Amino acid sequence: MRLTVVGCSGSVPGPEAAASCYLVTADDGERRWRVLLDLGSGALGPLQRHTDPLALDAVLLSHLHPDHCLDLSGLSVLRRHGPVPATTDLPVWGPPGVAERMARVHGVRQAEPLPGFRFGELSHGSPLRIGPFVVTPYAVRHPVPAFGLRLACGDAVLAYTGDTDTCAAPGQEWEVGAG
């Protein structure tokens, strides 16, 4: 498993840095799999230095603040109107309501999903498989619904938390100062 930091500038992209976007790749013996963790504002351009956006296998959105998901709108345009339009829908996983929220960001007025994507909703503790990756989402503390993501691939494990700090699992409390 390989991690490439595409953008990590925080809440606002900078002149030389995109907002949150991390490319995770792994080979399964037959091909290379490409999964994005977030696609924040300003990330679609630099992503193209590292991979063809049309070669992505999935996008996982930790939460729906613009600095973690806004460039999904641009990716939709690229997938539909780029030099070589995509022929299949790209799976996008995010918090509940992700399809409707991304349609509104893109300016779709009706309750139709953003074209070019197949949306799924993350659920606390419910793993999903994307090629060689097993992704387990965990609800985390943030002002909007958000997930930390555990990606396992063979013996390698990557944990990604987006915008949260250490926190107890939902329904659990930690005693401060406990040893």
Image (spheres, rainbow, N blue to C red):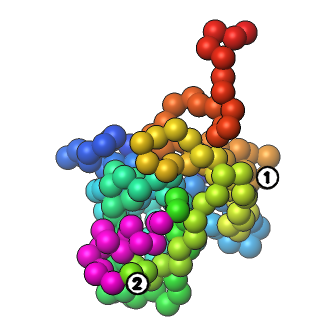
**Residue type for callout 2:** Glu
**Residue type for callout 1:** Gly
Split into 4 quadrants, where in the image is the C terminus? top right
> Which quadrant would residue 84 be assigned to in this image?
bottom left
Of 178 and 106, which appears nearest the observer?
Answer: 178
Give the residues drawn in magenta, as a range: 97-110
Q: Secondary structure at mark 1?
A: loop
Q: Are marks 2 and 1 in contact (CB under 8 Å)?
A: no
Q: Point out the tag, 2 or 1, that comes first from the N-terminus.
A: 2
Q: Which residue is mark 2?
A: 112
Which label is found at residue 171?
A: none
Of 146 and 1, which appears nearest the observer?
Answer: 146
> Which quadrant would residue 126 be assigned to in this image?
bottom right
Q: CA distance from mark 2 to mark 1?
A: 37 Å
Q: Which residue is painted at 33% across and 55% down in the image? A: 66
Q: Which residue is painted at 72% across and 65% down in the image? A: 129
Of 67 and 79, which appears nearest the observer?
Answer: 67
Question: Is 135 within the magenta?
Answer: no
